[in-house]
Amino acid sequence: MAIAPKYNTARSQSPMYFGALDGFRGLLALFVAIYHTYWPSFINGSAFFENGPVIIDLFFVFSGFLLFTLYAGKIRSDVDAAKFLKKRFARLYPLHLFTLGLFLVFVCFRLIMHAFGFATQDAGEILPFQPGANEGWGTLLSNLTLFHSMGLHDNLSFNAPSWTVSVEFFAYFTFAAFLLWVPPKKSWHFGLLGLGVAAIYVYLSALKPDMNITHDYGFLRCLAGFYTGVVVSYVFTNIKGSETVTKIGFKTASIIEVLTVLGSTAFVIYCPGKLQFWVAPVLFVFVLVFSFDRGIVSKFMMRGVFRYLAMISYSVYMVHMLFAVIFYIFASKVMLPILGAEWFVSGINGDLYLIPYLLTVICVSHFTYKYVEIKGARFVMALSWSKSKMQKEALSNP
């Protein structure tokens, strides 16, 4: 692997940089990559990963917390809103389009393998672009336009984890409108926002058995997490300079952080099913506690390895699914006949198999971050469709 790009030290020293939360973002991206593996392993078979879908909600809370902290009071016009949405589009879309292209290539390769007899069609299997397939022309179009997880389809398609990109992108529109038209300023405004979040979770709990909600009501799930983060940001901003908080020492902060990690982990492990809809208070406490970067856990999560994982976390999240599929195919079609069924069903072998898988994902993510995320964002931000810009181009190219 090439040498990692240098960290933005100015950013890491900024009062708006939350080192511990950033580190957790990188670690959680690896957790998601493990969760989506298909081969047996003790790690992925643990209760923590069995109930793993609820971890995704922490990403939504992170987004709401950070964006409200950065943009509160700064979106005051249509121009401000447009600039904000363009930045978010530039952040999300280039890598989404790139990984969608990779999955399209994989789908075509799959069709070719079946067409020439190198692969057999299992009972009940529907090949891509056939009637009833998840991957078809309709889902391809909705993926291209980011509508693919806005309740249009019955299943996930192509790069399954990208459902969060779809719903979060449209959550940004609600956020921009929120700050532009009804900017919250008073405590009771955020109290109403909290009630709205609670109402969403109550509604979802009446529809679903647990928080594994994606293609159908994923937008509501995203809104609940995102605006939980907005409320956390408001509380953080109002208490960070208080005497009570400033007097908390390193030892006390460390105890609070350890208890928060233990409590959050216990919630994931011991609160499956309908209990998962009580996740908002857990997420609220977690993000609020670690927004201060005060204790021993925060200092650990701010280490270079986690900052690096945070930097490439979006790439890890977006590229891992393809490699989870490829590694599974290799294990089941190549290694299984050679090493036998005992190897395949052994949990410890599956755990060891996670090592090359994760290293591959990290290595590829390093380059997609550098050459797709960064360059793609720069390309989008350089685009301008303003009237004056088009007039200048027309004059220069008669």
Image (cartoon, rainbow, N blue to C red):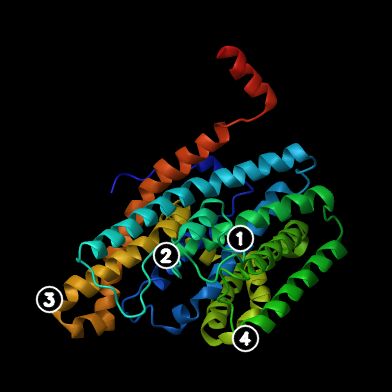
Query: Which residue in the protein does label 2 denote?
Result: 30
Q: CA distance from mark 1 to mark 3?
A: 43 Å
Residue 65 placement (x, y as % from top left):
66, 58
Q: Earlier in the sequence, mark 4 or mark 2?
A: 2
Would you call the spot at circle 1 few (<14 residues within 10 Å), some (14-19), or many (20 or more)? many
Farthest residue, direction left: 338
Q: Nearer the viewer, mark 1 or mark 4?
A: 1
Give the left or right position of residue 56, taking residue 235 as reference.
left
Query: Which residue in the protein does label 3 denote?
Result: 338
Q: CA distance from mark 3 to mark 2?
A: 29 Å
Q: Residue at coordinates 60% horizontally, 17% vertically from top-left?
A: 394
Say above or below: 241 vs 130: above
Give the left or right position of residue 21, taking residue 224 as reference.
left
Mark 1 and mark 2 in contact (Cβ < 8 Å)? no
Q: Amino acid at mark 4?
A: Lys
Count the numbered circles shown.
Answer: 4
Which of the pair 246/290 is nearer the observer? 290
Q: Amino acid at mark 2?
A: Leu
Assign a secondary structure to mark 1. Answer: helix
Query: Which residue in the protein does label 1 denote?
Result: 167
Q: Earlier in the sequence, mark 4 or mark 3?
A: 4
Query: Which residue in the protein does label 4 denote?
Result: 274
Q: Amino acid at mark 1?
A: Val
Visible residue check, residue 13? no
Residue 199 placement (x, y as % from top left):
76, 75
Mark 3 and mark 4 in contact (Cβ < 8 Å)? no
Q: CA distance from mark 2 to mark 1?
A: 21 Å
